[in-house]
Image (cartoon, rainbow, N blue to C red):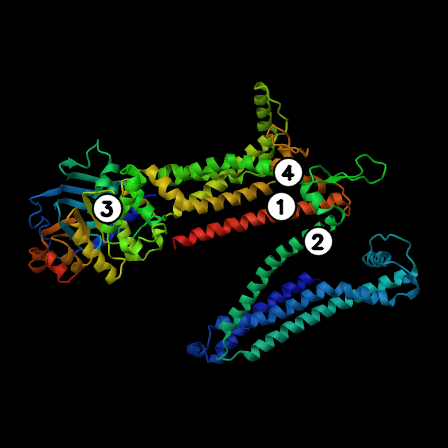
Amino acid sequence: MNPSTLLIVLLGLMAFAYHFGRKRAISAAGGVARLNTLHSLPAYYGLYAALWAGIPALLLMGLWVGFQNEILITIVKSELPPEILDGMSSGQIGLIVNDIKNLASGTIVSGVVTPEMQAAADRYTQLDQIARWAMWLAVLAVAVAGMGYAWAKTKPTMRARNRVETIFMVILVIFSSIAILTTLGIILSVLFESLLFFKSVSPLEFFFGTLWSPQTALRADQVGASGAFGAVPLFTGTLMVSAIAMLVAVPIGLMSAIYLSEYAPRRVRSYAKPTLEVLAGVPTVVYGFFAALTVAPVIRELGISLGLDVASESALAAGLVMGIMIIPFVSSLSEDVINAVPQAMRDGSYALGATQSETIRRVIIPAALPGIVGGILLAVSRAIGETMIVVMAAGLAANLTANPLDSVTTVTVQIVTLLTGDQEFDSPKTMAAFALGLTLFVVTLTLNVIALQIVRKYREQYE
Amino acid sequence: MSTTVDEMSRRTGAMSSAELSGERESRATVGDVTVANPRMVCRDVDVWYGAKQAIKGVSLDIGKNEVVSMIGPSGCGKSTFLRCLNRMNDTIDGCRVTGSIQLDGQDIYDKGLDPVPLRAQVGMVFQKPNPFPKSIYENVAYGARIHGLTNNKAELDELVSASLQKAGLWNEVKDRLDQPGTGLSGGQQQRLCIARTIAVSPEVILMDEPCSALDPIATAIIEELIDELRANYSIAIVTHSMQQAARVSQRTAYFHLGDLIEVGETNQIFTNPKHRLTEDYITGRFG
């Protein structure tokens, strides 16, 4: 008698409603020969009936499943002898309620089982049984009532098609608002946790402090008890790694986009383009160990042979590999905008005696520039948010340095280290992750908005 | 990006539906293809898109200071022929041109000849106005900058204003030369494209249906302009409008399914066509 069985029964009922709604519409029209007297096709009357059978019943079922437990607990609690709950904190009451439920389901309880609690558990089990049966009855009754309503409504003049389409539109609206509300929820949750963080650490210190040492002590006598939350080294680290990545990705991506869209013969393009896009399909963790185990040692040896002091985890290694990861981003976005420049522009330039490279430099790139810039900004926000490569290759030391051969750390790396492992979720140390996350989110969101704005403006130009 | 063979053969494929059933008469060109004072001389020009032949043995002269119009049903090869005259067909994959086309006695398909400077000598105006997304000034200065035609800013300014004046656009744009060329009206854009072409001092101007995207008033202005330009340039114009051909050109060539059917004085073609296909077309029996 569990809810999933009920769901299947309900689906069967909907199929039944569809079939009979359709039949009813045909007979209301006066047979198959007179279908043209119906406002809509018979299938729409069927759908109408099925939706009426299904939706109210499903809504009721959802509410029931959601609130049944809450209501049962309230009833059981109110029936407990009042002296048991006297003077208890809400946490202790929660513990008792948990015990009662565990007792009812037969799992291990935390304390001694008193006769009162055993009685309460029995009562809970009994109520639970009743509630389940009641839900079956109520849901099926609503489904049948819905069907009956649709049945009564089915007349040749009813605009079944319009009504069904309205219902579908409402469903679409609901689902899209789920996506939007989720985003909003994430933002709010990060925002509130950040506000908590900023209660213990001043925003001034966070945004302008140059010392990052988030280890706070559990006991007063521990070393490093204070904790320092100056995020500037993290931002500069992020900036440096992203800048190195863009220095790699933008020239390579842009040049290959120009070659592929303007010069490459069709055959070359058909092989080269997917190959380039394979780069985008490599998991970032693979890039990460490639950076840490292959690129970083090479850079280090190269640096040593040149007499330079290179850290084994350097911003350069992380940035280079991240740049390679971003190449397909830059190249495929740029190629799209270059291809979107109308052939007429090229013809016009050739007809004035321009060579292909003059045409590319003087007409195509300027025309495509806004789109290319937009693509690059999207790639930047990707680079800033990238985590795995920097976790593995850039290091953890929050050095405030401009030397790319040094080890740096980034915002994302620090979020990972702050939140992995066993953590207390009320100390500034963990809260700092939310503040960092919020900052990161604001930065990448701003970049994305600007980029999309630019790309859209460019698109309008040729339409 | 270049137009593919597939696309081109699809376009030219349209002509088979226009083919008249019944007897096939001679496709040899009627009328005199030569002129006394030629600028361009084309002999036995064949054009293939892949395996499909789009132009079949066309011979035609373009004289100095004359406007030659090319008419014919869609897919008859008139635009293809026009694009041979400045080697714009080179940008189409799989396009092959044989025969001889000479500009002032020089074979433009000669192996050693660079098509790039040729296109400065033989300018082209397209069906749809295609100003670059740059300022009006930069649009006109584009060719001069590429070819290094001027030595300083003053000369360039002079060239830009002279070209705009010749294209009859100067008075409308002289106060807003720094504004984008794409912001002009369709007719103004087309005159801007003509000014851009004139600025590199071509000898021949090719026009591929230059008025088909314009309203009648803009069309009238352009037609007047073409008549003025004849004093300094040779002009070949492809048009779908027979009235336009009659108004602007001295000689008319009628193309049909890749053949040049008839060439003659414009007056004679429209009043007394010699070939039955020409007569059918200009009397509106098909096309």
Mark 4 surroundings within 10 Å by alpha-carbon count, few (fewer than 14), some (14 through 19), many (20 or more): many
Q: Above or below — where is B184 with respect to A212?
A: below
Mark 1 and mark 4: span between their CA atoms?
Answer: 11 Å
User: Which chain is disc 3 placed on?
Assistant: B
Q: What element carries label 2?
A: helix
- Residue B239: tell me if it is visible: no
User: Which chain is disc 2 placed on?
Assistant: A
Give amino acid for label 3: Ile
Mark 3 and mark 1: span between their CA atoms?
Answer: 55 Å
Q: What element carries label 1?
A: helix
Looking at the image, tell me whether mark 1 or mark 2 is earlier in sequence order: 2
Name the residue that disc number 4 marks: A410
Name the residue that disc number 2 marks: A192
Left or right of residue A438, residue A90 in this image: right
Mark identifier at residue B198: 3
Q: Are marks 1 and 2 in contact (CB under 8 Å)?
A: no
Are the residues under marks 3 and 4 on the same chain? no
Looking at the image, tell me whether mark 1 or mark 4 is earlier in sequence order: 4
Mark 4 and mark 2: span between their CA atoms?
Answer: 23 Å
Query: Residue at point 51% right, 48% down?
Result: A451
Q: Do the residues labelled 3 and 4 touch (CB within 8 Å)?
A: no
